[in-house]
Amino acid sequence: MPLAVNLHHLEVHNLRLQGSLPVEDLQIDPRDEVIQLRQPLEYDLEVQKLDDGVLVQGYLRLVLECQCVRCLKPFQYRLELKQWTCHLPLQGEDRVTVTSDCVDLTPYVREDILLEFPRHPLCNPECRGLPGMSVGETANVNGAGQTKLGSPAWAELNKLKL
Ligand SMILES: [Zn+2]
């Protein structure tokens, strides 16, 4: 378990966990074919011991390879949790599993990252659907070649625009 807190070390001083975790180790199943994971999770966490548990606070970042649900264009979605906080109880019914002095943070990170996944990834909130149609696309400016590519579709879209 690479993303883990060693409670023994934590007794002495607060811990700083910094680095990246291979996305395979995060074991996230996006359950959505428009989202793919290829880049590692970046983390920068501060860990402190509380009376009855452990407090983890910090920064998480995972770049998702998405496909826009409107125009099908691939794009990168930067998922960031800038002030991620996780409380790990060491006592009581909900206490976390400790394996050889270590608590694995991966399941907690995974859970909160998944909650932040975009439901309907869009390359741009303004995306209108097809390349060249969205506001600010350069294809419109000198897109003579572009227009020829999909003439029938363009004719349809022009009708729709009216
Ligand atoms: Zn799009």
Image: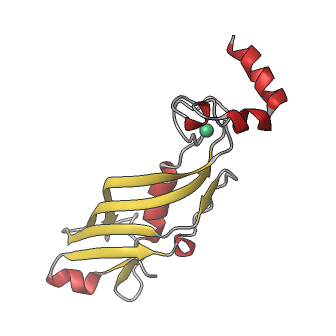
Rendering quarter of residue 6: bottom left
> Which residue occupies 42% across, 84% down?
99
Coordinates of residue 128 in the picture (x, y in percent): 62, 28
Does residue 122 lie above or below 88 as drawn?
above
Q: Residue furthest bottom?
A: 100
Query: On screen, 15 above or below 31?
Result: below
Is 111 drawn above or below residue 132 in the view shown? below
Check the picture and name the quadrant holding the C terminus: top right
Residue beneath the point at 62% across and 61% down: 29
Q: Quadrant of residue 10?
A: bottom left
- Residue 78, percent across and down? 45, 53
Q: Nearer the viewer, residue 10 or 30?
A: 30
Residue 115, image x, y percentages: 49, 49
Q: How has the structure been colored for display? A: secondary structure
Relative to residue 101, is residue 55 drawn left or right?
left
Q: Nearer the viewer, residue 88 or 75?
A: 75
Callout count: 0
* Extreme-right residue of the structure: 152
Give left or right: position of 95 versus 139: left
**From this viewpoint, which residue is outermost toward the left?**
13
Q: Identify the image quadrant of residue 140.
A: top right
Residue located 43% across and 81% down the image:
2
Q: Residue at x 66, y 32 (%)?
A: 129
Q: Vertically, is 65 above or below 160?
A: below
Residue 43 pos. (x, y %): 35, 68
- Ligand 1 located in image quadrant: top right
